[in-house]
Image (cartoon, helix red, strand yellow):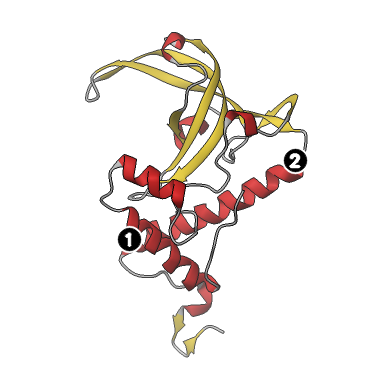
Amino acid sequence: MHSVGHKSGRGGDMMTTQLKLSVLKGKTKQERETIAAKGIKGETVAEDTKYSLTAEQIPKKTKKWTDGTGDIVVGDRIKFTEAVFEGSFRKPKFIGERTIIADVVNDSYGEKKQQHTFTIIPIEATGVKAESIKIGQKTTRKGRNIYRNGTDRLLWVDESLRKDYADEKHQRGSEARQIRDERKYGVLLLSLSEQPTKGGYIK
């Protein structure tokens, strides 16, 4: 694993992240994947976690399931239930649910809307159209869909190692949300300590 490079200070971190996103803008999927693999000036791009794993690199787990709703990280083995639809995109018809057990091998925050997406390798699928899930092959799911009906995860043999993965994800998530808010409101949001008052600024 390699370290993510950062400039010092919140402003520096944000400029670095914006630079990475600007480099990705307008690129094809293949070009983005190439950039993600090589990095920009020795750094990991914002769309790709530094903890991108192969199936063989997944950390060891216990056999005990626990609630992981809202905070799944790369390296987790998860179990979630999703809705299954048929018909057109404009007129989908709900036909049931399926449950998937999968290993999480990557996660990303989208370039445009900073939506959280997980790359998973399914291990088992049951329920409606379970046969359409390709076991052992990478696929993606939006975080909101994985969390929608609750998500279980297997406890790690070394939960302290998982904390490292979680801290890295949380940092990228904070950066992604700030970029989203800047784009949405058109200005850099001021922290509470910078809010102006009648007597000047709050110290």
Q: Residue 95 vs residue 66: left or right?
A: left
- Three-letter amino acid code at the position of disc 2: Glu
Residue 27 x/y as whole percent: 28, 48
Few, some or many C-alpha atoms within 10 Å of disc 1 (few <14, some 14-19, many ≥20)?
few
**Res 103 seen here:** yes
- Badge 2 is on which residue? 159
Residue 196 x/y as whole percent: 44, 82
- Badge 1 is on which residue? 183
Few, some or many C-alpha atoms within 10 Å of disc 2 (few <14, some 14-19, many ≥20)?
few
Which is more toward the observer, 27 or 99? 27
Which is more toward the observer, 186 or 166? 166
Which residue is found at the position 33% from the left and 57% from the top? 23
- Three-letter amino acid code at the position of disc 1: Arg
**Res 128 seen here:** no
Q: Is residue 98 above or below residue 194?
A: above
Which is more toward the observer, 161 or 88? 161
Residue 76 x/y as whole percent: 63, 33
The dot on residue 198 is: none
Q: Which one is earlier in the sequence, the residue at label 2 or at label 1?
A: 2
